Amino acid sequence: MDVQGGESKVGELRRISEEVEACSKCPLHLTRKRAVPGEGNPNAEVMLIGEAPGEVEDETGRPFVGAAGKLLNSLLQDIGVDRSSLYITNVVKCRPPNNRDPTDEEINACKPYLIRQIAVVRPRRIVTLGRHSTRVILGLGGLRVSEISRVRGRVFRVTIAGVEVEVYPTYHPAAALYNPSLKGVLKEDLARAIRAGGSGPASILDYLNGG
Ligand code: URA
Ligand code: SF4
């Protein structure tokens, strides 16, 4: 990536963040303290996409900085990955009250920001954390998902905003907080996605072509 490209990506991401911070396209703007646009490397090969900000994210304006974020950070550290090498965001940029699930209306209102972030960063791989993120991202690629357990551990090749990406669905870190037996799988899934093209045996991957 040349310097010119890098700089314009930074500018475009900043512009998206500013729009998110001023956004009132869905009712979540009424209850948020701060919007959480996302952060990270504008040239990231891997984008992590969560569901929605929680309490600490709402207070700080940064993604994955609460309990789930601490677990995510420690798993990344375990596999030797620098968090700042990734781009990290959420499907919905403002906190749903009491951390309830985002509604379809809220997801649809917010989706254009996510699509634009993907179009700017142009990641090679996307890790979807949890069922909402998985459903939305594979949906953008024209695939319907019934259950996360049917898709986690597989790799889906889809095109989103003209960008060809491999999607690695996995569990949400919050799920692994409540069910620590999921930590190992989550860590393996993260390692496989982030190191793909490197050492992992490609033959174990189950590639499916999306729309
Ligand atoms: N959970 C998410 O899905 N995203 C965050 O940013 C924090 C917790
Ligand atoms: Fe806007 Fe998304 Fe926040 Fe809703 S959740 S107000 S669409 S930025």
Image (spheres, helix red, strand yellow):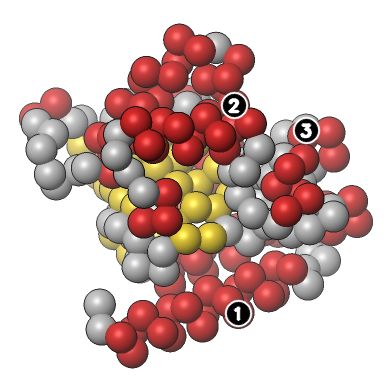
Q: CA distance from mark 2 to mark 3?
A: 13 Å
Q: Does mark 2's beta carbon lie closer than 8 Å to ligand 1?
A: yes
Let me know if residue 152 appears in the view.
no
Residue in the picture at 40% in, 42% down: 127
Earlier-in-chain disc, 2 versus 3: 3
Task: Give residue 124's mark.
Answer: none
Amino acid type at mark 2: Ala
Task: Give residue 174's mark.
Answer: 2
Amino acid type at mark 1: Arg
The residue beneath circle 1 is 15
In the rendered structure, the answer to whether residue 192 lies left or right of residue 11 reads: left
Tag 3, which secondary structure?
loop
Amino acid type at mark 3: Arg
Residue in the picture at 58% in, 20% down: 177
Against 65, residue 121 (above or below) is: below
Residue in the picture at 9% in, 31% down: 201
Earlier-in-chain disc, 1 versus 2: 1
